[in-house]
């Protein structure tokens, strides 16, 4: 189903941050897509960083990487997982990128003689970025999520750009959904609408009227409160949508369908609505909620206190678990506190172990100890990016007996750099957006485990790294039993290692978690979960026979 004019939906947030604008945007997009509309979502982030690539994961969660190499906000991961459509550079815009572009234009003389100001120059740049996707002709509807909370100083230029755009686009071509909080005061035993009223008032002071209110709440929103919100916030009663807390984010499309969010939106955009075809989605949801058994995977990392740091990995386990009809319990293990003498105690009960990506030397030895344990005890292992590099270092130290084997990232002067800075990175000094990023080709070796898993000769996977397997050690490694089973066809870069004598031991330089979606669970995660399930069954069988 296509429209002659691209329609725009803007999603703002009020009262507090972290209400789930990304999930609401992705859920609405799913419902519209399921009615035949071509939909995409973009995120406008109000921070001055050009991208989140240099931000601490503790502060901002994981940095998500697109096919074309953009380091972006983690919400783009939700967009892809829900819609099963790749995002790109154009789907994430920051204040830093906006100002950088305007300043570069000023330096080139494009504003010669003019005073460059927030209005109109910054707002014009925002409007231009918002409409890039719509002007491509690839989409009927573009949903734009505006980061932050209404009233934030940082968000003001974006709200002003929305005000201008609604006027520019004309009636029925642009609407605003305002996501807000209706808190429950337990002392009074009441839901309170006043914060929402103030939030809408703040939005209106900027010249923007919300068309739809989506109200986050812990309790059902009674009819009288919906009427009250409609009256005080200048929206129709049917456009006051309840978003009650859900047990999983994957419930939200169905909850929004029950509330009629898609119908209200399509009516306001003057588009036809139909019954969304979400049968495949609900099939996944049924398998996810009704597992036949469960397993426990250890996630070894140094950012485990904040789950958003590994958001895509955790979601990939949900997808792979549903595919295998198994509940995957992910147990976080902080690598900094993992030592040789406590490794068995902390890891022996696990059905599989994933050593996570990361940067820097903190927690490195704990990751290496974890790899040694799984290698020597035949526990299924998946190493991603740094996790793969730790597997190489562990093998070099404990199998090849190269005691000082290391990565030049952690030990710049090591005499045995089995992991080394990529040649193309040696002349780079800037940090932002300079790593090996985006999708790169990888040829899979015939007869390898990964070739059997992917069932393809060549794959394209997304990267985010500066260091690589040092091919000077490749022959030694392979002779001792660690094979390089995936190579970049152009550079010879080792992308995948595996140990064929081990039941399931795979390390990958790329990030498979970025490509896992509800519709297409990543085959590597599906196979890893299956291997962990088999490992659990084998252990249970041995334990029963001994008893």
Image (tube, grey):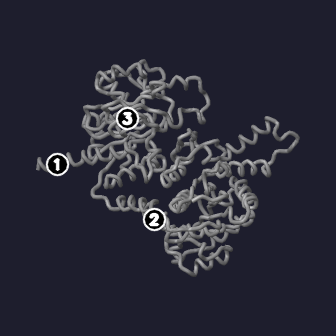
Q: Is residue 415 visible?
A: yes
Q: Read off the residue under disc 2.
A: 246
With 409 as the anchor, is 287 left or right in this view?
A: left
- Which of the pair 361/460 is nearer the observer? 460
- Which of the pair 66/308 is nearer the observer? 66
Asked if the residues shown at circle 3 and circle 1 are in contact, with their CB atoms under 8 angstroms apart, the answer is no
With 117 as the anchor, is 211 left or right in this view?
A: left
Q: Residues within 10 Å of mark 3 (few under 14, many from 20)?
A: many
With 545 as the anchor, is 74 left or right in this view?
A: right
Q: Residue at x 57, y 69 (%)?
A: 263
Specify which label sits upstream in the sequence, 3 or 1.
3
Q: Residues within 10 Å of mark 1 (few under 14, many from 20)?
A: few
What percent of the width, then of the height, locates residue 354? 36, 42
What percent of the width, then of the height, locates residue 482? 32, 27
Look at the numbered disc 1 and give the secondary structure of its residue.
helix
Q: Which of the 4 image quarters holds residue 362?
A: top left
Q: Read off the residue under disc 3.
A: 507
Q: CA distance from mark 3 to mark 2?
A: 35 Å
Q: CA distance from mark 3 to mark 1?
A: 28 Å
Look at the numbered disc 2 and give the secondary structure of its residue.
loop
What percent of the width, then of the height, locates residue 266? 60, 67
Q: Read off the residue under disc 1.
A: 541
Q: Residue at x 65, y 48 (%)?
A: 136
Q: How many marks?
A: 3
Specify which label sits upstream in the sequence, 3 or 2.
2
């Amino acid at each position: 189903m296509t429209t002659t004019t691209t329609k725009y939906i803007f999603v703002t947030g009020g009262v507090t941050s972290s209400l789930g604008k990304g999930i609401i945007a992705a859920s609405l997009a799913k419902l519209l897509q399921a009615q035949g509309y071509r939909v995409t979502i973009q995120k406008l982030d109000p921070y001055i960083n050009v991208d989140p690539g240099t931000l601490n994961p503790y502060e901002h969660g994981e940095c998500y990487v697109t096919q074309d190499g953009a380091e972006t906000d983690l919400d783009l991961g939700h967009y892809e997982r829900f819609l099963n459509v790749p995002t790109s550079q154009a789907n994430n815009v920051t204040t830093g990128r906006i100002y950088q572009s305007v300043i570069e234009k000023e330096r080139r003389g494009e504003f010669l003689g003019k005073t460059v100001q927030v209005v109109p120059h910054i707002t014009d740049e925002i409007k231009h970025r918002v409409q890039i996707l719509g002007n491509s002709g690839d989409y009927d509807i573009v949903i734009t999520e505006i980061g932050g909370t209404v009233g934030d100083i940082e968000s003001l230029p974006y709200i002003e750009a929305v005000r201008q755009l609604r006027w520019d686009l004309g009636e029925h071509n642009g609407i605003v959904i305002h996501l807000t909080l209706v808190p429950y005061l337990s002392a009074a035993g009441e839901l309170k609408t006043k914060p929402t009223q103030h939030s809408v008032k703040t939005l209106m002071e900027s010249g923007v009227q919300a068309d739809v209110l989506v109200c986050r709440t812990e309790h059902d929103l009674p009819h009288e409160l919906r009427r009250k919100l409609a009256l005080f916030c200048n929206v129709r009663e049917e456009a006051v949508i309840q978003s009650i807390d859900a047990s999983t984010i994957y419930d939200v499309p169905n909850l929004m369908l029950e509330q009629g969010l898609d119908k209200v939106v399509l009516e306001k955009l003057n588009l036809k609505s139909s019954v969304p075809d979400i049968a495949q989605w609900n099939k996944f949801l049924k398998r996810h909620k009704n597992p036949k058994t469960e397993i426990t995977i250890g996630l070894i990392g140094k950012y485990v206190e904040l789950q958003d740091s590994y958001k895509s990995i955790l979601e990939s386990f949900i997808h792979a678990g549903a595919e295998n009809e198994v509940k995957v319990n992910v147990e976080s293990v902080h690598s900094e506190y993992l030592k040789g003498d406590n490794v068995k105690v902390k890891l022996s009960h696990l059905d599989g172990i994933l050593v996570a990506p990361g940067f820097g030397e903190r927690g490195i030895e704990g990751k290496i100890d974890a790899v040694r344990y799984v290698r020597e005890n035949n526990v299924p292992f998946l190493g991603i990016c740094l996790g793969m590099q730790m597997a190489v270092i562990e093998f070099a130290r404990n199998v090849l007996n190269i005691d000082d084997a290391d990565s030049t990232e952690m030990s710049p002067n090591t005499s045995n750099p089995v992991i080394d800075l990529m040649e193309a990175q040696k002349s780079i000094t800037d940090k932002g957006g300079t790593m090996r990023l985006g999708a790169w080709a990888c040829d899979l070796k015939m007869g390898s485990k990964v070739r059997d898993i992917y069932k393809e000769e060549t794959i394209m996977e997304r990267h985010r790294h500066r260091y690589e397997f040092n091919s000077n050690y490749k022959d030694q490694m392979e002779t001792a039993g660690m094979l390089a089973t995936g190579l970049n066809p152009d550079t010879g870069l080792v992308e995948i290692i595996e140990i064929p004598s081990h039941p399931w031991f795979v390390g990958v330089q790329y990030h498979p978690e970025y490509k896992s979606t509800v519709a297409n669970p990543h085959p590597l995660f599906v196979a890893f979960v299956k291997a962990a399930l088999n490992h659990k069954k084998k252990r249970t069988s041995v334990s029963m026979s001994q008893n």
